[in-house]
Image: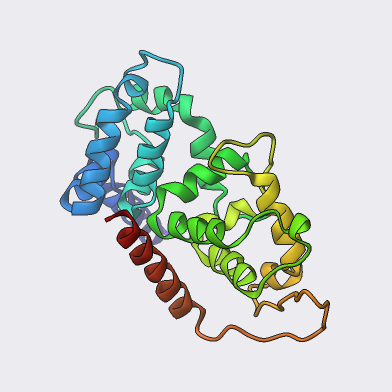
Amino acid sequence: MEGSALVLMTVVCFVFATEETCNDLETSCYTSLGCGNALHNYQLVCGRQLSGDTDECTEECQRALITLIARDNGYKFITCKCKKGNERYSDCDEKKRNIQVCKNILDAVERLNDTSKPINCLTAHLICDTDSTCAAALNYYHSLCGNLKDAGWCSERCNESINILYQTKYAMKLQKCKCDKTTDDFNCFELQQNTDYCLKASDLVNNQAVRYASHDNSNGSRQIGNRELILIVVVSVFLLKTLFQNM
């Protein structure tokens, strides 16, 4: 009995001894180029929020926070728990409290993979716009689709662009987000209306092949093969086209 208790205590001590602190995670993030750059930018752009000098989470700070969280070590750093006596900086807890001014972003990212919990559409758009693949897919959608109810039909290319958009990780929340207002560069009402108009919700929810709606209301359908390849090719072509147009 005493031997079992000793083994248990040894295991518990080992777990606590090897558990990464916020300082460990910060160091790990800095050793990775992408995470290190994102962390440096976050600490620079969100400096006033981290120090408690403002209760406003600016769009620049929101973008910096999302970019950092998108990195594995960055997410671990943002969600780590400060431990007394184990942190290099005594203000670890204070910074954790102060960054709660950006709670809408922190909560939104926590719900990123949970389709049952919708978030504000402006936040969902910001999350998508911060990721280059998602932003390119959204721009591709904008280039092919307008107000489809006014047009009277959904073209196959428009339908495909919507399907491509929702295959990107950071667009997941756009489909069912809470649309309270629009901006000049994003009309959430129109996107959700077009999504309902073009695609069958069951296909999106189950991540199955899209059944295309045609202008003659036929019941034909076709599958998209190798969706990941399609996403890469289409987005790449769109980006190259945009690049040449701006040259």
Q: Residue at x 50, y 84 (%)?
A: 226
Residue 238 seen by the camera: yes
The quarter holding residue 193 reads: bottom right
Which residue sits furthest left?
Answer: 31
Tell me, what colour scheme is on the image? rainbow
In x, y percent, where is residue 12? 36, 51
| Closest to the observer, 18 or 42 | 42
Q: Is residue 141 left or right of residue 81?
A: right
Residue 176 seen by the camera: no
| Closest to the observer, 185 or 42 | 185
| Closest to the observer, 185 or 38 | 185
Say if 211 sits above or below 147 in the image. Answer: below
Q: Residue at x 61, y 51 (%)?
A: 174
The quarter holding residue 124 reads: top right
In x, y percent, where is residue 214? 75, 76
Say if 74 sits above or below 162 in the image. Answer: above
In x, y percent, where is residue 44? 25, 29
Q: Residue at x 31, y 51 (%)?
A: 73
Q: Is residue 233 left or right of residue 214?
A: left
Give the position of the C terminus as an image quadrant: bottom left
Say if 6 sits above or below 93 in the image. Answer: below
In x, y percent, where is residue 176? 68, 51
Give the position of the N terminus as an image quadrant: bottom left
The quarter holding residue 86 reads: top left
Number of labelled discs? 0
Q: Residue at x 81, y 78 (%)?
A: 216
